[in-house]
Image (cartoon, helix red, strand yellow):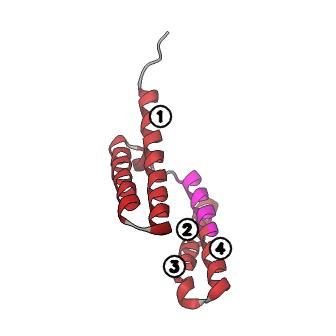
Amino acid sequence: MKSAFASVILWLVFLAGLASCVASGAVFDGGTKNLATYGGIALSLLAGSRIARKEPISFLASRPVLWFLFLLNGTVAAFCALAVDGTQGIMAAVGMGVVSLGAGFGLLQKRGASQPERA
């Protein structure tokens, strides 16, 4: 019972952080808006990392999903770098590139774990 209650609380905190990021522009102005946005980001990242440690999502580690994430996000990163101007394009390319690299490292780890060691 204690674990289920903790999971529900973590998910609620995660969703509250996401809602703070999304809705802060409609509710606040100026510095308060930025504070609510960045606070929501920090809250959702903290709660999301705790959820991921507690309840791992196993289908994300499968080879087909990793290949999809690697190729799609790499393509989107290249497209954003070329098609979107300014800081927004750079940040989108960096974000998608990080996800693509993470999936690529996951593929490399899977490859290394599936091959038998040589003597």
Query: Which amino acid is tagged 1?
Result: Gln
Tell me the distance, in whole angstroms, between the alpha carbons under discs 4 and 3.
Answer: 12 Å
Indicate left or right for 16 with 110 as reference. right
Q: Nearer the viewer, mark 1 or mark 2?
A: 1
Q: Earlier in the sequence, mark 4 or mark 1?
A: 4
Callouts 4 and 2 close, C-beta under 8 Å: no
Tell me the distance, in whole angstroms, between the alpha carbons under discs 3 and 1.
Answer: 35 Å
Tell me the distance, in whole angstroms, between the alpha carbons under discs 2 and 3.
Answer: 17 Å
Q: The N terminus appears in which quarter of the rendering?
A: bottom right
Residue 28: x and y, percent? Answer: 60, 89
Tell me the distance, in whole angstroms, between the alpha carbons under discs 1 and 2.
Answer: 29 Å
Q: Earlier in the sequence, mark 4 or mark 3?
A: 3
> Which residue has dot 1 on it?
109
Which mark is drawn over residue 39?
4
> Which residue has dot 3 on it?
22
Q: Nearer the viewer, mark 2 or mark 3?
A: 3
Callouts 4 and 1 close, C-beta under 8 Å: no
Residue 55: x and y, percent? Answer: 53, 54
Identify the residue at image location x=47%, y=13%. Answer: 118
Which mark is drawn over residue 11?
2
Mark 2, residues whose alpha carbon is within 10 Å: few (<14), some, or many (≥20)?
some
Q: Is residue 38 magenta?
A: no
**Residue 90 versus residue 110 in the image, above or below:** below
Span of residues in magenta = 42-55
Q: Is residue 54 magenta?
A: yes
Q: Please tell me whether mark 4 sits on a helix, a strand or a loop.
A: helix
Query: Which amino acid is tagged 3?
Result: Val
Indicate left or right for 67 with 16 as reference. left
Query: Which amino acid is tagged 4?
Result: Gly
Q: State the residue in front, 106 or 82.
A: 82
Residue 83 location, quadrant: bottom left
